[in-house]
Every structure is written in structure tokens, then in C-alpha cells.
Image (spheres, rainbow, N blue to C red):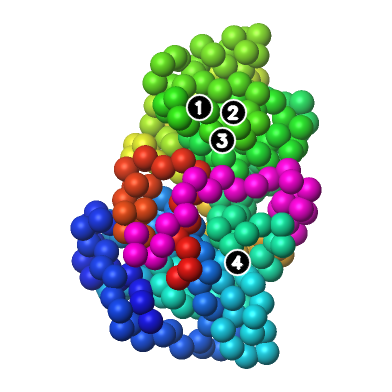
Amino acid sequence: MRAWQVGELGEPAEVMRLAEDVPRPVPGPGQLLVRVRAAAVNFPDALMVRGQYQVRPPLPFTPGVELCGEVADGARRGERLIGNPVLPHGAFAEYALLDAAAAFPAPEALDDAGAAALHIGYQTAWFALHRRARLRADETLLVHAAAGGVGSAAVQLGRAAGARVIAVVGGRAKAEAARALGADLVVDRTAEDFVAAVKEATGGRGADVVFDPVGGAAYTGSTKCVAFEGRIVVVGFAAGQIPAPALNHALVKNYSILGLHWGLYNTHDPRAVRAAHDELTELAEQGAVRPLVSARVPLADASHAVQRVADGLSTGRIAVIGG
């Protein structure tokens, strides 16, 4: 089969190589061989290729952590499923493996690209907003990187929950994307101070919930515009800077700092992951959520797609089509 291989760590465009004769992975107990119909590109793909992710597959490996695939053989042949492939056989290939227990039916309301993009980003946003922050209707939600893969999911899920959503983005094109997602207020951080904008929009109260996959200055600014009894959910550090929070500040202002590592729920509470999938599927059927797929590219262009995500040049998700 054709599959992208990483034989050394580095920048995706430099170290990813498309091989034509990689053996198909062989499913072990409880695993399914799937033909990849679409793979969604995620920031962790870039980190993994660089050797900067917490999961480090042995070299060589095939990157790609999220897919929509069709079961290739066995009793479940033909089923369309979404999930995280079993590394080192990642999603940027013609075939991959899924753990049967952690694979979910692809929502009928979504095409292959949309279904592939529903899993990681939307599960992360759902657990951040509902499990960790307990977002309530009529609260104000501040979303950083709101036009990105996980940020765009948070915007849609915030709207679906009845919250007022303030979206922070970087650049005019991403601002347009955030408006199209339904954000109530869009702040371009390259042109204005998001702290001042949040305070003005909330009459000085601040945001009840902050969704932060960025870290760095985004986190620091959020502590200045979080509301009394507000909750800051730390989702990631796309800026490359891990904040060192001043806990005395959290004490004085009476806000909470919450961490979210969604992958741990697959081990500690898989039933909650399945319940979230069921709710996301229903929201997709209702049209309340629809993954923002900004581009669909063939397998041959996967390395350039991962590099675009690594460089912060993408909006929403890029989908690699057809395996």
C-alpha cells in the first residue's frame, strides 16, 4: 500500500516520505483493518513528526491520528467508522488499524472529511466545555484560536449550549471564518487587544469560561479578563510557551484553572467518550455542528498539509482524502 513514512524527526515537509510498497498492517486481537476514506490533519501530527509530542512512535512510522475509514474485511466489512488509528500505522496511508472498542460509527449527516474531523477536536471541546468547565446557557465563552480545528469546534459547541461566544483569531481570513461559525463577537488579536474587547463586551464582568489551546500570551491575557468564579480550561500550548500561572492571582480573583487531556478519558472513562460521540452525532444530525474543513487534498499532498498546520497557516481542518 501507499503510506507516508517518517524515518527521522524534523519538519513535516522535509522528513515525510511517500512510500509505494509499505506492507498493509495486520490486525491483532480486537483490531479492525480499515481502508482510509479521509484523514483529518491535526496539530499533534506536526508535533509527532517533530518529536515534540507526548506519544513517540518508533521510527519509521506513519503519522496521522484521526480518520474516517471503511472496514476492509471480516464480519463488519463495509462499516464506516471514525477513530484514532493504532500507531505506528497512522492515518496518512491507504489502510490503517482501529481498536474496535474505540471506533465509532461515522455520522450519516457528515461526508468522509467532515466525519474524520469530528472526533478529536469535537471530543476535546465537548469535554472541556461540559465535563470540565460545566458551561451553562447564557454564560460568556471566550475561545482562543477560534478558527482552528479544536477552536472552531468549541465555538460551535458553545453556541449549541446557548452561550455567548467571543472568538479570538489571528488575521482577517480567520476572523471571517469565525463569524461564519456563529461567534457573537470576533476579535482579531493582530489588530486589537482581546482583553479590552472582552471587558467592553461584558460590561467589565469578563468571560465565564475561557477555552485556551494556545497558552503563552493568550493564557496571560485571559487571566486579566476572566469573570468572578470563571473557569480557564487549559487545552494545549500551540504558541509553544507553557505558562507558569501565578496562583495568588487565581486566589485573589476567585477563578479556576482546569486542565484537559482528552486522551485520558479513553482509558479512565471510555463510556463518557462514547456518550459524547452520541451527543455529537445528534448535534451533527441537527446541523448544530459541522466541522470546518477548509481544504481537501489527495494523499500525495499530505506532507504539505501537515506543514501548513505546523506553521499555523490553516483554518479549521485540512482533510487528506482517499487514503
Q: Which kind of residue does numbered mark 2 sit on? A: Arg
The CA span between labels 4 and 2 is: 28 Å
- Crowding around mark 4 (Cα neighbors within 10 Å: few <14, some 14 to 19, many 20+) is many
Q: Quadrant of the C terminus?
A: bottom left
- Identify the element where label 3 is drawn: strand
Mark found first going from the N terminus, 1 or 3: 1
Cβ–Cβ below 8 Å for labels 4 and 2?
Answer: no
Q: Which kind of residue does numbered mark 1 sit on? A: Ala
The circle drawn on residue 175 is 1
Tell me which residue sits at (31%, 54%) in the image. Answer: 304
Q: Nearer the viewer, mark 4 or mark 3?
A: 4
Residue 15, placed above or below residue 256: below
**203, 11: nearer the viewer:** 11
Residue 295, placed above or below residue 196: below
Return the residue at label 2.
Answer: 179
Q: In the rendered structure, does residue 297 fall within the stretch colored magenta?
A: yes
Q: Which kind of residue does numbered mark 4 sit on? A: Ile
The quarter of the picture where residue 151 lies is: top right
Describe residue 156's horizontal placement relative to residue 252 as left or right. right
Tell me which residue sits at (30%, 79%) in the image. Answer: 20
Cβ–Cβ below 8 Å for labels 2 and 3?
Answer: no
Cβ–Cβ below 8 Å for labels 2 and 1?
Answer: yes
Cβ–Cβ below 8 Å for labels 4 and 1?
Answer: no
Return the residue at label 3.
Answer: 211
Q: Position of residue 266 (x, y in %)?
A: 60, 64
Mark found first going from the N terminus, 4 or 2: 4
Cβ–Cβ below 8 Å for labels 4 and 3?
Answer: no
Mark found first going from the N terminus, 2 or 3: 2
